Image (tube, rainbow, N blue to C red):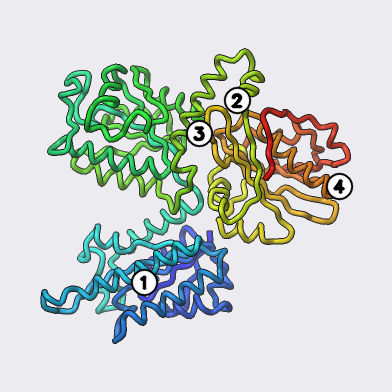
Amino acid sequence: MKLSLLSNVNLDSLISRLSKQYDVYKTEGYGTWIQEIINPDSGLYSFGPDMVFIVLDGEEMLRGQSESNEIIDVNINYIEEAVKNNPNITFFVSNIDLWTAKIESAKFGSKERRLEFLWEDSLFLLCEKYKNLYVFDIKSIVEDKGREQFYSKKLWYLGGIKYSMKAEKLLEQYINRCVASFKGKRKKCLVLDLDNTLWGGVVGEAGIEGIELSDYKEGARYKDFQRKLKEIKDLGIILAVVSKNNFDDAIKVIREHKHMVLKEEDFVALKINWDLKSQNIRDLSEELNIGLDSMVFIDDNPVERESVKRELPEVVVPDFPQDSSELVDFATELYNNYFYTLDTTYEDTVKTEIYRQNMKRRDAQKSSASYEDFLRSLETRIEIRRINAENVQRAAQLTQKTNQFNLTTKRYSEQELLALINDQGFEGFVAYVSDKFGDNGMVSVVITRRKSDSEVELDTFLLSCRVMGRFIEDRIIGFIEDLYKKAGYKKFITYYRPTEKNAPVKDLFERLGYTLLDVDPEGNKKYVLDFERLSECSRKEFGELIAL
């Protein structure tokens, strides 16, 4: 990962720490951020960063400026030009905190607050306009930790270093969080206990009226915790319950308690029984078709936490706060540490429903006479479209997050995908899948490259794990093959590059009738399909395919 940290104050020690994790571009002097971003021949652009963080100190930006509004407009224009002219780079620009207010009468009010708002409002307008720009929320860090902890007046007056060591560690955490989200590294599922976790007390002993869950006092802590979990869920994280409890007692609280924020439909699954929690989590992983390393387990009981840690080391098991008044802060930490997201797609907002539909499909499969009968009964519809500005966000997200069915596991940002599809040699396609149980949304990305007048190669072919096993890949690859055969191409070159997680597709092209050309010592495979013998290849066809 290549990134750059630009600033108008000294952040050399922070840059040094970041350099231990990433390839970081260091400018000659911390006051040159404007020259770096506006000069196309600057060292910044020669370095070729994936991400640029511009962390600005408001005091230094406005120091000595009689017309503060004007300098804000000028700097915003510089930033817009850089963002517009470099769509392949993702920019994070900080809002500002003005730490020394002019002494004025109460009647006059705070000019600093108005300037802070003007800068941030201008940034958010740019964010709406450009997909490759995000606000780096330094102001919230200052507000959360307090200015006395964030700034170091002593270091500033002695050595021109404005931020404390603690502040720089917080900034490093924020940058790491942004990088992880950019790379699609967030977890997928938050697994929750019930008693003394979502509510206070044990429902089997206290009954529905005796638990702590209300708008005031102790019960309000749990209700506020649920509100935060609901916010996390609404950003595309699926919630599940794993609880040792009498099902009837627990479900009554979920369905009937007037202060329950999280309803039954907010969970993809409710495993409320007396089985080992580790086994329930393992079963949940298989039913949802997600890895154990995509799951975070929350339980107030240290014995249960330790058991899950021991049995399922891939699952993240954070410590639960001993003081329930810290639950809201705990929820925020969970989001920041494991689920932080830069942006959401439509598929994120309906993800819980999508997974619930998959559970219905699994039940329907169990009751079918054969797997083929089940697939025919689904009434699957596959729509293939070209990648464009409207769907590129979700397409990029899929390249970042899809691991099991991913032949080459190439990761692309929105900007990189847009650049590819604007290249004359590349073409990009996405597939949407729906059936009688509901809409799965966009589930596949295919990127091809025309190598010559006679050969095309497959750059990327991936399929979301939630539709694996339904031979949807056969219809998609069949469409791609037919498209290029009709266009006059003779050969289709494809690849399989092994990773820790994509073993399920290691023999895909053998099954589809491709000829293996080469296998290197690392297990990377190269295949070819001669379009002249395409009619000899077997494809399983379930459902209707529509190309738009």
Mark 1 belongs to which amino acid?
Answer: Leu
Q: Is residue 500 visible?
A: no
| Residue occupying the point 40% across, 67% down | 123
Residue tagged 3: 290
Neighbours of disc 4 within 10 Å: few (<14), some (14-19), many (20+): some
Toward the top, the furthest residue is 369
Q: Is residue 296 visible?
A: yes
Disc sitting over residue 377 in the figure? none
Q: Secondary structure at mark 1?
A: loop
Mark nearer the N terminus (3 vs 2): 3
Mark nearer the N terminus (4 vs 1): 1
Residue 404 picture location, percent across and down? 59, 37
- 3D distance between C-alphas at marks 1 and 3: 40 Å
| Residue occupying the point 58% across, 53% down | 412
Residue tagged 4: 490
- 169 over 492 or under it: above or below: below
- 3D distance between C-alphas at marks 4 and 1: 55 Å
- 3D distance between C-alphas at marks 2 and 4: 35 Å
Nearest the eye: 312 or 56: 56
Q: Secondary structure at mark 2?
A: loop
Mark 3 belongs to which amino acid?
Answer: Ile
